[in-house]
Amino acid sequence: MKARTLRLSLMIILSLLFGLNCLIHSSPVSGTDQDASEIVKKASPAVVRVEVRDGLRRIATGVVIDKDGYIATTALISPRNEKLMVVDHSGNRYEADFLGFDPETRIAFIQVKDKKLPAVTVGSVRNLVPGSWVCALGIAPDSGVTVTQGIVSSVTENRLRLNLWITPGMSGGPVLDEKGQLIGLLRGVYSEESPIVFRFRDREATGEGYVFSQAEAPASGMAMAIPVEIVLQVFKEIKTKGKVERGWLGVSIAEDREGKVIVTYVEEDSPAELVKLREGDRILKIEGKEVKSSDQLVSEIRNRQPGQEINLTIEREGKPQELKVKLGAVPEEEAQRELELRFPGLFRKSPGIPRLPEMPKLPGMERFEFELGVEHYRFIGVYLDELNPELSKYFGVPEGRGLLVSRVNAGSPAEKAGLKVGDVIISADGKRVETLEALTDQIQSKKKGEKIVLDIIRDKKKLKIEVEVAEEKRKNWPGIERFSEGLEGVLENYHQELKKGQKEWSEENPEKTKMAKEESARVKPQILEARKELTRDFEIFWLDSIRRI
């Protein structure tokens, strides 16, 4: 028992600090490495490289899951009219057919017919627990198979959180257990809702194309995978129906300053419009369960079937209301559009700004224009991961949970203050911080140069460290509400000036008054249509806050 505990402890510590990366052709240096090399030798024939060519290569990894040549991969390779190619472990190239993808799990399936590609052995996540050993396989841009190994951090019914490093090209690759069986499909590097120091990034440029390893977020040492049971469930639906049917409400949502989920847009002829859900409504509960985030609500809706009725508790003008909604099915074009909006550079050029019609010049009409704002972003220079209760206890957190330091940026305030990889942060300025969001709020409330006092656990001993808060400035576009309000302001300003002109000139210039009135009626529909187009297209710039369900 002691030997098993010691071995598990060593695996956890080594995987946290180093990731234990190794190439398929590397010589094993320990018993665990030898096990990994045997597993890779057995499973690598089922691992393929997936390419989409549209003037620029898009590369990902895939894994053959069926003897008939069905391959699971990331939905980020979803083609439009481009050619889809598969390269096996021996370098043979095959053309593949695209079968479909699921926007919720971001899994896609393709097929290479009549080539007898070997399939991976399918396992299960039922016996996985935090600390279980796993390895992940991928195809590097230079065609070589790579493998990284680590441990399971947490297991839920719809995702695996893994403590291992992702190398370029691994998204869509298989996650294997110690028997070499498929237990999950890599979706990307794990990203929490409120990362401390890194910005959202949807691609990594490498040579002549994009390699999908960081579609979820920049590297943090934590990867996310979809459990094999869900992969097979999605495969069954796509194989038989060409798509995964998921619930659809027909709204865009965001979180307001109080953290409440608010409706920002209602689709025409959608289930939401049929029950008269409005822009500005707050969604408080779904089926009696409190809605704590937009991600939670998206998951609740998407994991239900079309035609299912749900009860929503909303707040409108300060008063609660109950609504019963019959969910629709996610439109086919919505699924592709969601990928294009979330990862615009991978599928199409950013949309152009539609031109507003010219308005008649009137006295006193002020020019209206948007300017880029400046966001003051404060940070300390660390990558953090939320620990579950079991791992928190393992690292010596006396009660509750902590935040594990998985990386410290060179030259950052955190490094200068002595913060180290493996430290666990439990409080900031005397307040408990069990989530990234809580610590982020504490840091953002500081001014540049101020210090934040962190209580940490190091080697199961409690220490205090003072870290100076740094700051950088970022340019950002105004939010969608501000953008719409600005367009409404243009209309309001225009009509105010028009009315003023009519009043002043009506007696002296009846013909001019008539002309201005006719011009107003002519351009108003064009302006409203342009506003609708702008609101839709500019969703690209604030996808971190706008979600569609």
Image: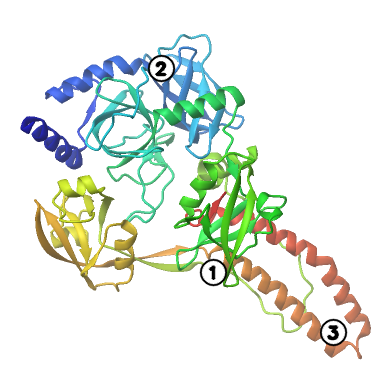
Residue 207 position within the rendered picture, expressed as x and y whole percent measured from the top left: 40, 35
The quarter holding residue 29 reads top left
Left/right of residue 158 with respect to residue 383 in the rendered view:
right
Residue 283 position within the rendered picture, expressed as x and y whole percent measured from the top left: 54, 60
**Disc 3: which residue:** 502
Residue 18 or residue 511, whichever sits in front: 18
Report if the CB atoms under discs 1 and 3 are less than 8 Å apart: no
* Disc sitting over residue 282 in the figure: none
Residue 59 sits above or below residue 322 on the image: above
Work out whether residue 408 can be spotted. Answer: no
The residue type indicated by label 1 comes to Glu
Q: Earlier in the sequence, mark 1 or mark 3?
A: 1
Q: Residues within 10 Å of mark 3 (few under 14, many from 20)?
A: some
Q: Earlier in the sequence, mark 2 or mark 3?
A: 2
Please tell me whether mark 1 or mark 3 is closer to you in this view.
Answer: 3
* Label 3 residue SS: helix
**Disc 2: which residue:** 88
Residue 57 sits above or below residue 119 on the image: below
Residue 419 or residue 519, whichever sits in front: 419
Report if the CB atoms under discs 2 and 3 are less than 8 Å apart: no
Name the residue furthest right: 511
Whole-number angstrom distance, CA of label 1 to CA of label 2: 50 Å
**Disc 1: which residue:** 371
Residue 136 position within the rendered picture, expressed as x and y whole percent measured from the top left: 30, 29
Left/right of residue 419 with respect to residue 210 in the rendered view:
left
Whole-number angstrom distance, CA of label 1 to CA of label 3: 32 Å
Left/right of residue 389 with respect to residue 95 in the rendered view:
left
The quarter holding residue 33 reads top left
The residue type indicated by label 3 comes to Gln
Left/right of residue 263 with respect to residue 463 in the rendered view:
right
Q: Earlier in the sequence, mark 1 or mark 2?
A: 2
Please tell me whether mark 1 or mark 2 is closer to you in this view.
Answer: 2
